[in-house]
Each structure stands twice: as C-alpha cells, then as structure tokens.
Image: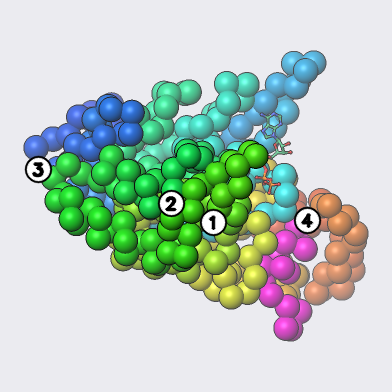
Amino acid sequence: MEAESCAASPGTGDEFGRLSTQPEEGEADLVSDGSGQMIARPKGGTVSLTWEDLCVTVADEQHRCISILQGLTGCARPGEVLAIIGPSGCGKSTLLDALAGRLSRKTKRTGQILLNGRKEPLAYGTSVRKSIAWLGCVTQDDVLTWTLTVREAIYLSAQLQLPDSMPLLEKKQRADTTIKEMGLHDAIDTRIGGLGNRGLSNGQKRRLSIYLEISTRPKLLFLDEPRRGLMRRIVSLAEQNKMTVLASIHQPNSEVFELYKSLCLLSLGRTVYFGLSSEATQFFPLNGFPCPSLQNPSDHYLRTINTDFDEDIEQGFGGKQSTEGVIKLLVSSYVSSNTYRQIQ
Ligand SMILES: Nc1ncnc2c1ncn2[C@@H]1O[C@H](COP(=O)(O)OP(=O)(O)OP(=O)(O)O)[C@@H](O)[C@H]1O
C-alpha cells in the first residue's frame, strides 16, 4: 500500500520550533485577532501538520488515568481535507482539540505535534487564536453575537479579520461572494437570534460560523462535524487556497465520502487506518473485511469498527470475530503497513 509522504514545507518558526507571532518583513500581514491584538498571518505560506505517537489521558474522579487517544500518528497536508471518521466516542473531537491546542486542563497529552516539520508552537493551554493567526476553529458549539444580522456579522468580521492592507471594497466583495457560496443570501437581513429570540435556524448558524472562519482563508482549519452540504465547498476552497483542513465527520454518505482524498479512521482512541481514502478499499478486504457490493464504503468501515453494535463480525476468510478483536487486528495490520512507516 502506498501513500504520499508528508513532506514538510518551509517552516515559519524560530530556532526553537515556535511559530513567531511577529511577522518578518515581506513574509506576513499584520491582522487583528478580533480582540484588538495584532497578529501575524503568513503570506502565501502553507501549513503541514504532523502528529506522532499522540496520547491523551484524563483523570477520573478517583484520579485513575483514563486513556482517550492511544499513540496516534498522522499528518494533514496543504490543499487537502483530512476526514477524521469513527464511531461516536472514538476520539475525533479530542484529536482535533489536541492538535489545535484546545484540550482542557484536566487532560494530559504526550507525543509530538509538528507544524511544517517543527515542534508545535503552543504551550499547553495557551489560546490558539492568539498564537496562530491562520488557524480557524469551528467546534460544535457556535459562538455568534445574537443581536447582529447575518450581513452585519459578516461585514464586521471581514473588516476585523481581513488584512488592513486589503481595500474596504475588496473586503466587501469577498464577503458578498462567500455569502452566496455558503447559501446565506436568503437570510442576509435575519438577526442571528438566540435563546428566546428566534432568528437563524441551527443549520444557518452553523453555516454562518463556518463562513466567519473561512472568509479569512486560514492556512489551517479545524472543523468539528461540519454539515454535509458544506463539504463540497470546503474541499474546493482548500484546493484553491492550499488550506490544510482537518474535519471530524460523523457519518458521511457516499457522495460526501468521495470528496475526501485522505482518511483517518479511529476506533476506541486508536488509528485503524490512515491514508488515501482510495486505498482503504484495499486495506479492509486485505484484512478479511471486503465491502459488500452496493454498500457505501464509509458505512462498511464504521460498521466493522463500531463496538456500539457489538455483534460478531463475519470475516471474508470465513469465521467470526468480536468487534474488539477486529479493531485490534486492523490496528496492528495498519501499524505494520507501509502507510504507517511513510507517515513516520
Ligand atoms: N474531559 C474528558 N473527561 C472525561 N472523558 C472525556 C473527556 N473528553 C473526552 N472524554 C471521553 O473520551 C472519548 C472520546 O470523546 P470525543 O468527544 O473525542 O469523541 P468523538 O469521537 O468526537 O464523539 P462524537 O462523535 O460522539 O462527538 C469519549 O468516551 C468521551 O466520553
């Protein structure tokens, strides 16, 4: 099995591997982070993100150490959307939080995170937004100002977040284009609304908060369970703007699944498969779990590794295995595979 190696593009960090928040002349624009602080956004640079042997644990009430992620290794490349897929509770959001430096203080993380081949710039618990300007983060909890209309929120965001060097007219044009592309034009003068103040639907709010992040064309974008309808647009934005996007996806249908070139498949906090989506169609049959004809591959992968429906899984070679046994088999097969060695 082959996968492209995750070559690091030129780094923008200092000699300690930290990414500078101060721009070097000609390399970065100064932009506002929305709270009045000016931060650096690299011009035209791309971001490769690599994680090695990443483990996350949390202490329970009896101070026992509970493992959430176990030794994950992978990478995300410019111009691509990496789909992080797995059953509920497998660790998708925790992986995104770990990579984005958003883990809660209760958790402990080990392993390495490299940006453009250099050590991560984020000290544990620091605010990501203040440290890396080109990182957008859209979590499952949208944070929007409910008193604003969609138009007001978008224009305000464009003014605050796009570089000061960009003319106002261009900022407005950028905002108008994306409003259309994100399908928000029908609700342009609707107030966002909130508890007790009816406004946008939940789906529209979600689209708006994703818009507010991607309008600045971040170089690195984390998306926690974006709506299916948005993915086509996000994939093409990533390609056009050489954005590195990591998206946790709950249950992609076959049409959406085909959009992703790279796939990170998790179960019980471990990597079951990481690599080209096209090659997962070989990985599963090679290990005895061929996708039944007419079944969506992602449904097949999820069914094979989902302990929620713990039933003995039929193997193509004959015989049956428990789901946990299947997961163990796939994890060790993946670890000994060429794909794993290439990522490392
Ligand atoms: N701070 C924490 N304390 C205790 N357990 C946690 C904590 N954070 C995550 N977990 C547990 O770790 C596991 C992974 O959680 P996570 O939210 O990353 O899963 P997920 O794959 O994103 O799930 P879903 O698809 O349902 O959103 C879950 O069992 C969750 O209960």
The residue closer to the viewer here, 35 or 248, is: 35
Are there few (<14), some (14-19), or many (20+) residues within 10 Å of tag 2?
many
Q: Which dot, 1 or 2, sits closer to the camera?
A: 2
Taking the spot 43% from the left edge, 24% from the top edge, the residue there is 126
CA–CA distance in space, label 1 to label 2: 10 Å
Q: CA distance from mark 1 to mark 4?
A: 31 Å
Q: Amino acid at mark 4?
A: Asn
Q: Residue furthest left?
A: 25
Mark 3 residue crowding within 10 angstroms, few (<14) / some (14–19) / many (20+): few
Scheme of image coloration: rainbow
**Compared with residue 25, is residue 218 higher up or lower down, i.e. above or below?**
below
Figure quadrant of residue 142 = top right
For label 1, the SS is helix
**Residue identifier under label 3:** 26
- Residue beneath disc 1: 204
* Kind of residue sitting beneath label 3: Gly
